[in-house]
Image (cartoon, rainbow, N blue to C red):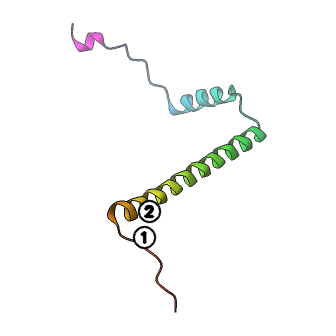
């Protein structure tokens, strides 16, 4: 059997206007969340993202201190004195 015989039959292409009409029809069937739900879930995502960022920041700094002081033995960099 050849690969041409194994292919699925082609469907006729539709025009961009027909595609847009069908897409709009499907979008009208969607149950969209309420504004309050969207705001609440957005706030949850932002808070969790901030917590994860703080967690990564703290552990990155902790590991930097452990590596530079403990393993390498050099002091941590400090800001130059102001005059």
Note whether 28 is above or below 39 in the view shown: above
Q: Are marks 2 and 1 in contact (CB under 8 Å)?
A: yes
Quadrant assignment, res 73:
bottom left
Q: Residue at the spot x=50%, y=29% of the render?
A: 15
Return the x and y of residue 80 as percentages of the image width and height: 46, 83
- Specify whether residue 56 is painted magenta: no
- Specify whether residue 3 is painted magenta: yes
Note whether 44 is above or below 69 in the view shown: above
Magenta region's main secondary structure? helix
Q: CA distance from mark 2 to mark 1?
A: 7 Å
In front of the other: 64 or 66: 66
Q: Does dot 2 land on a helix, a strand or a loop?
A: helix
Return the x and y of residue 69 as percentages of the image width and height: 39, 65
Q: Answer with mark 2 or mark 1, whichever residue precedes in sequence.
A: 2
In front of the other: 43 or 67: 67
Q: Does dot 1 land on a helix, a strand or a loop?
A: loop
Q: Residue at the spot x=56%, y=48% of the render?
A: 52
Image mark for residue 76: 1
Magenta-highlighted residues = 1-6
Image mark for residue 65: 2
In what quadrant of the picture does the N terminus appear?
top left
Residue at the far bottom in the pictured view = 83
Residue at the far top in the pictured view = 1
The count of marks equals 2
């Amino acid at each position: 059997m050849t690969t041409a015989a194994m292919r699925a039959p082609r469907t006729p292409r539709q025009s961009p206007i027909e595609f847009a009409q069908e897409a709009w029809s499907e979008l009208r069937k969607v149950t969209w969340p309420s504004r309050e739900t969207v705001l609440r879930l957005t706030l949850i995502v932002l808070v969790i993202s901030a917590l994860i960022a703080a967690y990564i920041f703290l552990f990155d700094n902790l590991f930097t201190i452990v590596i530079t002081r403990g393993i390498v033995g050099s002091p941590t960099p400090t800001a130059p004195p102001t005059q």
